Image: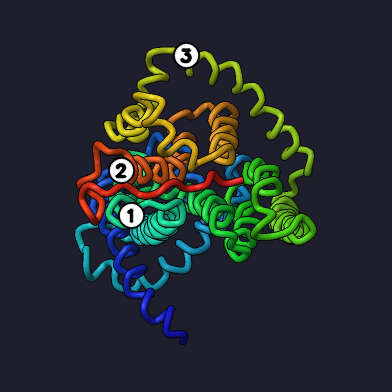
């Protein structure tokens, strides 16, 4: 173990535990009291964790990584669950608890990656920690961590993509290409953005090679499941085309009062911080120039997810890594928050915009 690593790992562990603490408490209430009777998504992923693919909607049928991890964790939990909570029937509760555990661990990983990304953009540690807190107390973080869902893994993929591009991390981009197609099929929308902005971390030939590997793994999983069910591959194509029908609905909802309220509710009153950072030309230049064009195009990728899914709030939460970086930069560089910097009134020097 190198000296640099031995000095750094305690601080990363502290950030990870902070992120875990932020999501685990509120998410436990969600896990305990959520009414599963009206949620097709959660029932689908519970079925996948039991190895039952029949009757699962084709949109969710192939997202098996998180359900498989939950199933592996549920087995030891089942051995002790009835002794710890004898008042609850043990049929489904251990599996729900396993999903809660896996998703909380993944969301804490998102918090750690986002924290490190904020530092790479030049934020001070305190501002980065506050920005992580801002995105992890979102209602969608609670929803994602507390329920049998797979959004936590995909959010980690998006966070790793931003971290890999900013930090020039080849390992992060490789993880994106391997995990992304398994987490959600829409991960392929990230590929053009990565090919343009991820070249410093991983050249085009290497990116395309890892994309082929990740795509082949995802295709192997889909083929195995389709063969087991006797489902024709054309169903996947038809399902993908069906999502285009959501565009009209999403656009109408986006311009409605209810839709705007749904967007605001993603990060709640923390949304006021970027709005404050837009108050003047001078204020905007302090952080928008640092984010650069790559941030705008990543936001466009998230917008595509939102429009095709029809679920504006849930898919809009994929912007959490970018939102956190924006908040951290404003807290670090805006004179209104100079008291957060180490020297009190000193302002950080100018930073070059990313490519």
> 139 or 126, which lies in front?
126
Residue 118 drawn above or below residue 334 = below
Q: CA distance from mark 1 to mark 2?
A: 9 Å
Where's residue 8, x and y in %? Answer: 38, 74
Q: Are dots 3 and 2 in contact, CB under 8 Å?
A: no
Res 103 → quadrant: bottom left
Picture residue at 47% right of the left edge, 34% below the top: 316
Residue 249 on image: x %, y %: 55, 17
Q: Residue, x 42% and y 19% (percent of image)?
A: 259
- Which label is found at residue 255? 3
Q: Is residue 342 left or right of residue 73?
A: left
Q: Which residue is mark 1?
A: 124
Q: According to the image, label 2 marks what residue?
A: 331
Residue at image location 66% in from the left, 57% down from the top: 200
Of helix, strand and loop, which one carries label 2? Answer: helix
Using the numbered discs, state the Cα–Cα distance from disc 3 to disc 1 in whole angstroms.
36 Å
């Amino acid at each position: 173990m190198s000296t640099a690593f031995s000095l750094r790992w305690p601080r990363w562990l502290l950030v990870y535990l902070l992120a875990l603490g932020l999501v685990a408490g509120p998410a436990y209430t969600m896990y305990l009291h959520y009414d599963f009777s009206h949620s097709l998504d959660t029932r689908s992923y519970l079925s996948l964790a039991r190895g039952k693919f029949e009757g699962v909607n084709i949109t969710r049928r192939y997202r098996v990584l998180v359900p498989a991890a939950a199933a592996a964790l549920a087995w030891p939990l089942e051995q002790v669950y009835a002794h710890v909570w004898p008042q609850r029937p043990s049929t489904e509760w251990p599996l729900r608890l396993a999903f809660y555990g896996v998703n909380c661990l993944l969301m804490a990983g998102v918090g750690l990656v986002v924290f490190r990304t904020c530092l790479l953009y030049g934020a001070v540690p305190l501002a980065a920690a506050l920005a992580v807190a801002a995105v992890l107390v979102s209602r969608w973080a609670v929803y994602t961590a507390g329920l049998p869902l797979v959004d936590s893994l995909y959010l980690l993929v998006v966070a790793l993509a931003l971290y890999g591009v900013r930090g020039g991390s080849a390992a992060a981009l490789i993880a994106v290409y391997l995990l992304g197609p398994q987490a959600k099929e829409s991960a392929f929308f990230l590929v053009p953005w990565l090919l343009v902005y991820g070249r410093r971390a991983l050249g085009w030939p290497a990116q395309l090679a890892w994309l082929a590997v990740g795509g082949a793994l995802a295709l192997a999983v889909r083929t195995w499941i389709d063969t087991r069910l006797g489902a024709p591959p054309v169903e996947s194509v038809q399902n993908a085309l069906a999502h285009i029908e959501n565009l009209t609905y999403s656009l109408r909802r986006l311009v409605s009062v209810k839709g705007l309220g749904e967007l605001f509710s993603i990060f709640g009153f923390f949304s006021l911080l970027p709005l404050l950072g837009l108050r003047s030309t001078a204020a905007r230049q302090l952080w928008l120039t640092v984010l650069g064009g790559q941030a705008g195009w990543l936001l466009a990728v998230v917008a595509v997810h939102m429009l095709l899914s029809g679920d504006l709030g849930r898919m809009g939460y994929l912007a959490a890594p970018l939102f956190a970086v924006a908040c951290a930069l404003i807290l670090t560089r805006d004179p209104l928050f100079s008291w957060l910097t180490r020297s009190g009134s000193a302002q950080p020097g100018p930073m070059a915009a990313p490519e």
